[in-house]
Every structure is written in structure tokens, then in C-alpha cells.
Image (tube, grey):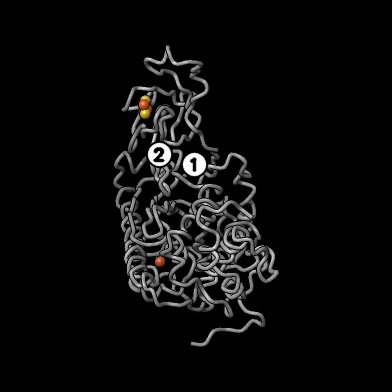
Amino acid sequence: MADLVADADVLRKLVTEDDLREFRKPTLEALNFPPHFFTSPEIFELEVKEVFMREWLCVGRLENVPNSGDFLTREIAGESVIVVRDGDGEIRAHVNYCRHRGSQLVEGCGNTKSFRCPYHGWMYGLDGKLRAAPEFRQTVDFKKEDFPLHSLGVELWQGFILVNFDKDAQPFAPQVSDMEKWGMSLYGMGGQVTTHQWEFEINCNWKAYLENYHEEYHLPWVHGETFQVFTPMKGWTFFEGLTDQPWQVGVGQFPGICIGDTGEPEFPYNPDLLTKVPIEYQGMPIWLAFPLFGALNSLDATVWFAFFPDSAEKTRFVMGLMVDKEIAERYFDGDPDVVPKVEMYARNSEGFISEDNGIAETQHKGLRTRVGGAGRFCEHELGAWMFHEWLIDRVYAPALGYGEINGHGKANGDAKLAPNGASSSE
Ligand code: FES
Ligand SMILES: [Fe+2]
């Protein structure tokens, strides 16, 4: 069994094997996670250790650090990470703490030739190597090469920058290779550029916030005037059994749907999206690569998301709008044919996210109850159920020594909405 951060007996009371067996049933038979799963600091610490310290985390886009020396910082579960483009143009990521006595090195973003610690002046190159340690000549057996910054694994995928605290982690791309089944690469995210980026701090648990992105059940209630108009709840499909890899996709099945006011594309798009993508995946796919990264693709634009849990009850959320590079350049040049359309996409993206952010905080206030028990899923919450299954298999069951739960094998690969194709009651 894994070496647990909290007392194992405490965690086993919070997450019992019997509970996991109830959660790990087919969607329409399962219980969902009870309130304390979203508020317990002990469960959050377990997730930090078993999820955030081991999985690939999206920290931004290549266009966030276009030039040598450009850097940004990201905070996740109490860790601060520096992402920087070095002098050779390579992207690197370092933990933002000085190897002398631990001070943070930088805040925010900017451009620099090196990182100099504000406390006693140790200076590190962009590659993380310690270059200068003032007044250390007398220190016995001190070698600068023994004290580089702690660097993280970095992988670039479709223009996104992913980092991993676990040096032994398997590469990200092969873990999501099945995304080609719905034509992901035809959307050309690697050739898109972010024109707008937002950052929100939300008083809610990261799991509850992600679930919102993977169930269409809330559309009529939360997005009645916005998303629901173009993509009504019953027009969405999540694809059970599409993959056993750690991601999932749902599609709003309205070919030609886009994030503008009319639902029609404003910019040129790849015509293969309407001919080479299997018909069931045409429309507006929203996908989530577990645990903290995803996007909503439309014909001519992408809204991407990265989630940064701070604590059990606080989550930072970064969202970007991106369009094809040439359109983005015209936008930044102030082209009057492009600016109002991109601004419209940005306005609409911000509009539906503010609705999600609001309901996430309202939900979290309810989840603070001490009396609540688990609820149930309906047929429009398959994506949220799949996410729970992944957490059970990947984190809770192995970390607490419960082994395989209900003999289901991998979560995504054998997803079943109901044992006999039953449908929900109205
Ligand atoms: S803590 Fe950084 S130089 Fe002392
Ligand atoms: Fe939503």
C-alpha cells in the first residue's frame, strides 16, 4: 500500500470500501460522492499526493512564453512552479524555491536572464543550474552543481505546456492517443494562438468543478439563456467505452455549432471537420484529460481550461480562447474584420463560464453540510460518473489498500450507462 499522508485509519473511515463499491456501480445504479469528499482536508491531501504529484498538469500555452527568458508561475496545491523558455528556446519547469534556505524566487510572469533569490542573492540560470552563491568560498565541500533548482518533467502537446512532478511518469501523448477516434487533431490546436485568457479563483472543490464540465444535466438550469440555446441538454452525448485511456469526450451534436451569437463559424475552418470526422462526433466536442486539463473545440475556435486546486475548498481556474494563428495576428493588429468577432467569442466564453463559476460556489456552500449523504446520477451525468470511476481506480482504492473494486477493470473502458439499457425517469 502507498505511504499515506494522513493517518490510514482516518482515511479509511472517510472513504470506506463499502462506499467505493456503491460508487463503482453502473451509472444509473451508483451513488455519487457524498459532501465530505469535497471538503475533507485529509482526502484533498491524498489527492495531492496520488494525483497532482503524479499526473501531467497543463500550465499554459507555448504562446504564453514566446521568447527566450519569458517565464510564468503557477500555484498548485501549495507548490509554486516556474515555467520558462531558456536561451535555446526550450521550455523548462522548476519548483519555485531556492536551494539555499527555501525562499520563493519569482512571482507572476515576465522576462529574465536568470533567477536571483531575493533573500541572499543565489543566482540560477534559466536551465535551473546554480550559477552564483555569494560568500560561499569558505563553506566546506560546497559545490554549486549539487544545488540546482528542482526541475519537473515537461511535455509539449498541441501547443500546450504540460509538467509533471513525477520524473518517472509515462509520457502524456500516448495516454491520449485515442483522441484521434473523434478527430481531435483536425481542430489544429497546435496551430492556434490564445487571444484572451482569464483566471478565476473559485470557492469550491476541484472535483465538483470538473464534474460540471462533464455533465449536461445542468444546462437548462445554469445556462438557460446561453449554452442551452445552441446546445440543449438532450443534444449532448458522452461516449461510453470509447477508450480506456484517462480522458473522455462529450459532443454537442449540432454540426456547424460555434461560440458566436449565431452559432455559425465566423472564420475559415478545416473542411475535413465536416467530412472526415465520424458523424456522431461532429458538433462541439468538450474533452477532459484527467485530472486537470481540457477544452471545448468548435470549428473555428477553442476554449481551453486548466484547473489549479489550492485546497479542498479553493480552486483556481485558467481559461483561454484561441483561434487560428493568422486570425490571432490580425486580431492583435486591430483588423476591423476580425476584432469584433473575436471579442464576441470572448464575451460568450466569459459569459457561460461565469454561470458555471457561480453555481460551483453555490454548490460548495451546500457541500459544507455535516449531515448530507451521497446522491444518485441520471443518464445526463455519464461524464461525471466516469471521472468518479477513474478516481476510485486510480487513487482511492489502491491508496487505501482496497484493491480492485467490483472487478470492473479500467474505468473508461467498460463504462456502462445501465445494465440493460434502462433509461431514466422524467
Ligand atoms: S534563501 Fe535563497 S539565497 Fe538564501
Ligand atoms: Fe456549465
Rendering coords of residue 206 (x, y %): 43, 59
The percent coordinates of residue 277 (x first, y second) are 60, 59
Q: Seen from this angle, which residue lies furthest bottom?
A: 425
Label 2 Cα crowd, 10 Å radius (few <14 / some 14-19 / many 20+): many
Q: Secondary structure at mark 1?
A: strand
Ligand 2 neighbours mark 2 (CB distance < 8 Å): no
Q: Residue at x 42, y 41 (%)?
A: 326
Above/below status of 419 relative to 239: below
In this view of the protein, can residue 301 be seen by the observer? no
* Amino acid type assigned to the residue bearing label 1 in the image: Ile
**In front: 6, or 39?**
6
Question: Gap between marks 2 and 1, in whole Å?
Answer: 9 Å
Residue at the spot 42% in from the left edge and 49% down from the top edge? 77
Please report whichever mark, 2 or 1, sits nearer to the chain's N-terminal start.
2
- Residue 317 to residue 352: above or below: above
Do the residues under discs 2 and 1 have CB atoms within 8 angstroms?
Answer: yes
Q: Is residue 172 above or below residue 266?
A: above
Amino acid type assigned to the residue bearing label 2 in the image = Asn
Decide if residue 67 is on the left or right side of residue 392: left
Q: Which mark is residue 278?
A: none
Q: Where, by quadrant of the figure, is residue 243 drawn?
A: bottom right
Residue bearing the label numbered 2? 64
Local secondary structure at mark 2: helix
Q: Nearer the viewer, residue 279 or 123?
A: 123
Q: Which mark is residue 161?
A: 1
